Amino acid sequence: MSSRAAYEELAKARMRDIYATMDEYRSKAADPSRTSLKSAEKALAALEHRCDRARDHLRQLCDADDDGWESMRSDFDSMLNELQTFTQTALARVK
């Protein structure tokens, strides 16, 4: 497996982890004793928007030629790191 293919698989696994964290947040945020419903819905909408952007960026990354892939990779890494931090922070607020 090439390093590009390995990276893409790792990126897809990180996205799955982020979605799992979002699902956990969604289930905890549904409990009204943990958080206000309005703030939970707002945070969830922001999470979903960021995840959609990251998923689209990952598709573009996978479809890019080698030169484009290299330049998009660092942007995607930053996007994933921010998204992971954002989802973990949101989840911590409802624990």
Image (cartoon, rainbow, N blue to C red):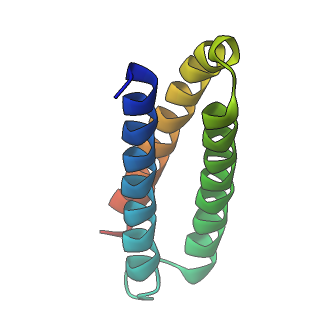
Q: Position of residue 62 (x, y in %)?
A: 60, 35
Specify the quadrant of the image occupied by residue 19. bottom left
Position of residue 76 relative to residue 47, above or below, is above
Seen at 43% across and 44% down, the residue is 84
Position of residue 75 relative to residue 12, above or below, is above
Specify the quadrant of the image occupied by residue 11. top left
Q: Position of residue 31 (x, y in %)?
A: 41, 88
Seen at 39% across and 45% down, the residue is 14
Q: Which quarter of the rendering shows the C terminus? A: bottom left
Q: Which quarter of the rendering shows the N terminus? A: top left
Specify the quadrant of the image occupied by residue 94. bottom left
Seen at 46% across and 24% down, the residue is 4
Front-most of 25 and 75? 75
Q: Position of residue 37 (x, y in %)?
A: 57, 82
Farthest residue to the left: give it. Answer: 95
Along the horizontal axis of the image, is 80 left or right of 45? Answer: left
